[in-house]
Amino acid sequence: MHILITNDDGVRGPGLLALYQAASKFGQVSVLAPQQNWSGCGHVKTLERPLRVFETSLLDGTPALASDGAPSDCVALAMLGIIPQAIDLVLSGINTSANLGDDATYSGTVMAAMEGMIQGVPAIAFSQDRPRSGVQDFGISACVIDHVLKAFVQDGLPAGVFLNVNVPDLPVSELKGIKMTHQGKRIYHDRLDKKADPRGGTYYWIGGEVPTGEYDANSDIGALADGYASITPLQGDLTAEVKFDWGD
């Protein structure tokens, strides 16, 4: 199996190296990731400027490719021929904070997986909740990735579906298990900060407190709160299942 991995934290991100190490047990792994941090970029297709690809390395010296494009650009570039071998699976992450509920639409990590699905390749995004203190340990994510990839090898994924996997930041011994979940509802506490630059011009910074969420034991938000890793199946079809009689 040939696996493409990318992320939105940049090619030198520690989560990308952890994902590479976990995925390498399952086949050949190629890396094409953003040169810089693209957190919060969502689903991007760069059309108004050329994209460049560079040879670089992961934190441990493993050879990799990087692009000045977004995470979804990286997946598209790989699929369109930058990586000549056929790709069987796209993995994105490990993001260094959770991507729960409505976060999925903002997340470069999740939308890179969506780009894989759009290109017709199975895809999975992995995120780990932000650490409570100290340096983030991806050991718990490695265990979850191993479980998820074994299940993928056995069962595959339906066409048009990709997975958003979120892992709590806990010691492996404290993980309650892995749950299939639905997408929860994030609550954002955004704040607009108005500031002046050194030349007197006005600029704005969107800030605020860390998002929270509505608790539902069967949602991705509830699963993480209860000490479980969550697997949420997502799809590209955004059609709402409601009826409107607004036609002619």
Image: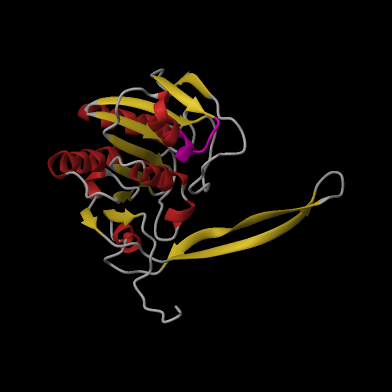
| Residue 8 visible | no
Is residue 95 shown above or below 21? below
Using residue 57 as the reference point, say whether residue 228 is left or right of it: left
Q: Which residues are magenta?
A: 68-74
Which residue: 36% across, 54% down? 236
| Front residue of 118 and 248 | 248
Residue closest to the far right: 199
Q: Position of residue 155 (x, y in %)?
A: 14, 45
| Front residue of 41 and 45 | 45
The quadrant the N terminus occupies is top left
Using residue 194 as the reference point, say whether residue 122 is left or right of it: left
Using residue 198 as the reference point, say whether residue 29 is left or right of it: left
Is residue 148 shown above or below 65? below
Q: Position of residue 171 (x, y in %)?
A: 28, 44
| Residue 27 visible | yes
Which residue: 29% across, 60% down? 223
| Front residue of 39 and 52 | 52
Is residue 27 shown above or below 245? above
| Scheme by which the image is coloured | secondary structure
Asked if residue 72 is among those painted magenta in the image, a careful observer would answer yes
